[in-house]
Amino acid sequence: HFKPVRQIGDNEAAVISGSVTSVENRPTKNKLTVTKVTLDDGDRGVVTLTFFNTWRLKATFDKLIGKRIVAYGTVKRQY
């Protein structure tokens, strides 16, 4: 089992599982692209995965909307 998103602390490395709910590319002021992928873990936890300067990932994650994926990274909580 994966740890629910709501139980993961700030700056904690974690493996999560969730359904892809949205994907978007955002340009930055210095002409880079930030890709944001939103996951819902099904247990009242929502997380946004952030990828820097990898605009091509949007097409990959668009195909995964509604599907469950596994991700690993360090959680940064922003309130």
Image: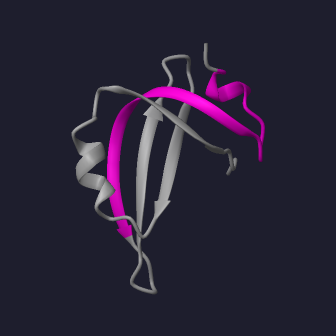
State left or right for residue 75 relative to residue 38: right
State left or right for residue 62 relative to residue 35: left
Position of residue 61 measured from the top left corner of the image (x, y, whole percent):
30, 44
The residue lying at 50 percent from left, 55 percent from top is: 50
Position of residue 22 measured from the top left corner of the image (x, y, whole percent):
34, 42
State left or right for residue 64 relative to residue 74: left
Q: Nearer the viewer, residue 19 or 6?
A: 19
Q: Residue furthest bottom?
A: 30
Position of residue 71 measured from the top left corner of the image (x, y, whole percent):
52, 37
**Can you say whether 17 is above or below 11 in the image?**
above
State the count of labels. Answer: 0
Quarter-wise, where is residue 43 in the image? top right
State left or right for residue 66 relative to residue 9: left
- Magenta-colored stretch includes residue 29: no
What range of the chain is rendered magenta? 3-26
Q: Nearer the viewer, residue 62 or 6?
A: 62
Q: Residue furthest top?
A: 1
Position of residue 63 measured from the top left corner of the image (x, y, whole percent):
21, 39
The image's colour scheme reads one colour
The residue lying at 37 percent from left, 67 percent from top is: 26
**Viewport quadrant of the N terminus:** top right
**Can you say whether 54 is above or below 13 in the image?**
below
- Magenta-colored stretch includes residue 19: yes
Quarter-wise, where is residue 27 in the image? bottom left
Would residue 65 be seen by someone viewing this image from the given angle?
A: yes
The residue lying at 34 percent from left, 62 percent from top is: 25
**Can you say whether 33 is above or below 24 in the image?**
below
The residue lying at 51 percent from left, 45 percent from top is: 48
Would residue 79 be seen by someone viewing this image from the given angle?
A: no
